Amino acid sequence: MRPNGDTLADLARALRGTSLEASQVPRFREIVRLLHRLPPGRERDGLLAVAYLRLYQLLGQEEDFLRGYSYARTAKLEPVRLLGERLGEGKR
C-alpha cells in the first residue's frame, strides 16, 4: 500500500501508477499525507491537487474537491486547473 519512496519524483510516479478505483482510496490518502510532508512548491501543489481531485472523483466529498481545486489554482499548472474546473462543472 505504501508508495515506493518519499521524494517528489517517487510520489509523482506512485500517483500516476494508482488506478482510479475505490480500492485505491487508502493509497491516495497515503500519497496526500506524504506530499504534505514535503516543502510547498508548484510541483508538490500540483500533485496534491491531482490526488485530492482523484479522491473527489472516487468519494464525492466536497472537501476533497475544494482542497484539490485550491491546490490546482496555487500550482498554476493549466492541465490540473482544467481538471478541477471540469470536475466542478459536474457538481452543478
Image: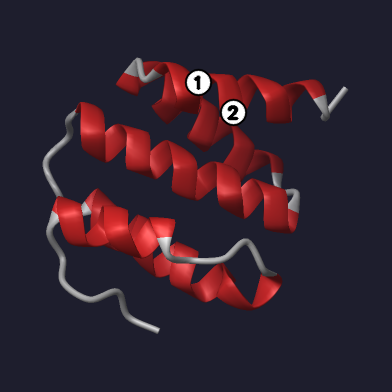
Q: Nearer the viewer, residue 1 or 14?
A: 14
Disc assigned to residue 6: none
Q: Is residue 30 above or below residue 37?
A: below
Badge 2 density bin: few <14, some 14–19, many ≥20, Cα 10 Å: some
Residue 23 point in image, percent of width and height? 64, 78
- Left or right: 58 with respect to 32? right
Q: Is residue 58 above or below residue 86?
A: below
Residue at the outermost right position: 92
Judged from the image, the secondary structure of the residue bearing numbered disc 1 is: helix
Residue at label 2? 83
Residue 50 point in image, percent of width and height? 47, 42
Identify which residue is drawn at 47% across, 63% down: 28
Identify which residue is drawn at 32% across, 22% down: 75
Q: Quadrant of residue 6?
A: bottom left
Q: Are discs 2 and 1 less than 8 Å apart at CB?
A: yes
| Mark 2 to mark 1 CA distance (whole Å) | 5 Å
Residue 15 point in image, percent of width and height? 39, 58
Identify which residue is drawn at 70% across, 57% down: 58
Residue at label 1? 81
Residue 19 point in image, percent of width and height? 56, 66
Q: Nearer the viewer, residue 59 or 47?
A: 47
The colour scheme used to paint the residues is: secondary structure
Q: Quadrant of the N terminus?
A: bottom left
Q: Quadrant of the C terminus?
A: top right
Judged from the image, the secondary structure of the residue bearing numbered disc 2 is: helix
Amino acid identity at mark 1:
Arg
